[in-house]
Image (spheres, rainbow, N blue to C red):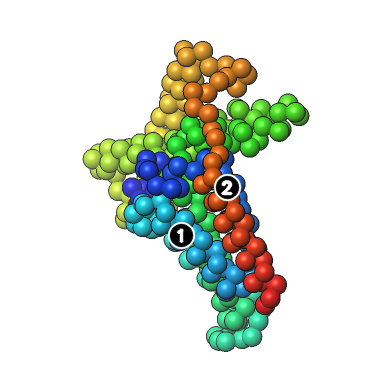
């Protein structure tokens, strides 16, 4: 299961999406989130899903990556979807004792599932096609107006990117610890819930120790390289938006307008 988590990983490529400016990709991702939650009908939500399919097809990445990014959260999504079925009013379809299933519950449950899956897949497109360095620079540039209020923009962008970048590292570390504990006779698959919870403790403790050790090593490495934050910092590669970025933004706004218009027409 842990091997299937691809959040935070970057896959180099030469696709149209890879070559887009990181700032533009961040803006498009935010507009896509608005698009998903602004859609209240089947056709408007379908427009958002079509936008995602087109974007992902342009990345030239394997479709299995989307499945891998969604697979770890499937149990949570299914439980949430089942709960939503019983807590929305509408025309009753089925009743068993005090349990009632309505068309409103089914609709809201289905919409929730589609929105969350599309949200995860859309966010994955951003991280799959954008390197951590570009992502840091993009976040810092977009939040730069907050510097007027003495907001630590560079530090925030750096922390967000480091956290995202270290997700695959900690997943790999967790797998190593689990394998080591299994070699020592630890059992993570049988027994009661309490026994399984107790078996996780020998994994969590070494993982926390490893996390603090890596944080200390990273801080020491940054200090040795005379890192002093964003003040006076320059970049070897400057971000420049081109015609392809403008076209991508226009297409995104067009899809967002279509979603809003379809909802208003219905």
Instruction: Please identify the residue farthest to the front as the structure is shown.
Output: 243
81, 39: nearer the viewer: 39
Helix, strand or loop at disc 2? helix
> Mark 1: few, some, or many residues within 10 Å (few <14, many ≥20)?
few
Quadrant containing the C terminus is bottom right
User: Residue sitting at 34 percent across and 54 percent down?
Assistant: 62
User: Residue sitting at 46 percent across and 12 percent down?
Assistant: 224
Dots 1 and 2: beta carbons under 8 Å?
A: no
User: Residue sitting at 43 percent across and 44 percent down?
Assistant: 18
Q: Is residue 145 visible?
A: yes
CA distance for labels 1 and 2: 17 Å
In this picture, residue 175 sits left or right of residue 100: left
User: Residue sitting at 46 percent across and 60 percent down?
Assistant: 54
Q: Nearer the viewer, mark 1 or mark 2?
A: 2
Instruction: Please identify the residue farthest to the left as the structure is shown.
Output: 183
**Sequence-wise first label, 1 or 2:** 1
Picture quadrant where residue 26 is located: top right
220, 188: nearer the viewer: 220
Question: Residue 141: image x %, image y %?
Answer: 61, 33
246, 145: nearer the viewer: 246
Marking on residue 246? 2
Q: Is residue 68 visible?
A: no
Reading the image, the residue beneath label 1 is 54
Question: Residue 56: image x %, image y %?
Answer: 43, 55
In this picture, residue 199 sits left or right of residue 250: left
Question: Residue 175: image x %, image y %?
Answer: 32, 41
Instruction: Please identify the residue farthest to the right as the structure is shown.
Output: 149
In this picture, residue 135 sits left or right of residue 190: right
Q: Is residue 54 above or below residue 143?
A: below
Marking on residue 15? none
């Amino acid at each position: 299961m842990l091997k299937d988590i691809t959040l935070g990983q970057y896959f180099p490529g030469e696709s149209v999406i890879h070559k887009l400016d990181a700032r533009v990709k961040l803006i498009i991702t935010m507009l896509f989130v608005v698009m998903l939650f602004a859609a209240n009908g089947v056709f408007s939500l379908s427009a958002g899903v079509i936008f995602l399919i087109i974007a992902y097809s342009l990345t030239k990445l394997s479709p299995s990556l989307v499945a891998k990014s969604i697979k770890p959260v499937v149990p949570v999504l299914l439980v949430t979807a089942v709960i939503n079925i019983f807590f929305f009013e509408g025309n009753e379809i089925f009743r068993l004792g005090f349990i009632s299933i309505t068309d409103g519950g089914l609709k809201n449950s289905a919409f929730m599932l589609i929105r969350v899956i599309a949200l995860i897949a859309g966010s994955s497109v951003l991280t799959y096609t954008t390197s951590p360095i570009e992502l840091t620079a993009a976040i810092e540039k977009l939040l730069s107006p907050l510097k007027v209020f003495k907001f630590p923009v560079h530090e925030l962008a750096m922390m967000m990117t480091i956290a995202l970048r270290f997700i695959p590292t900690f997943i790999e570390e967790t797998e190593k610890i689990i394998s080591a504990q299994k070699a020592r006779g630890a059992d993570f698959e049988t027994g009661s819930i309490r026994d399984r919870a107790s078996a996780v403790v020998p994994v969590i403790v070494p993982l926390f120790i490893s996390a603090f050790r890596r944080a200390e090593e990273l801080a020491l490495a940054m200090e040795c390289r005379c890192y002093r934050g964003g003040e006076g910092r320059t970049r070897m590669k400057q971000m420049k938006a081109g015609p392809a970025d403008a076209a991508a933004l226009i297409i995104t706004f067009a899809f967002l307008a279509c979603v809003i218009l379809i909802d208003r027409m219905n």
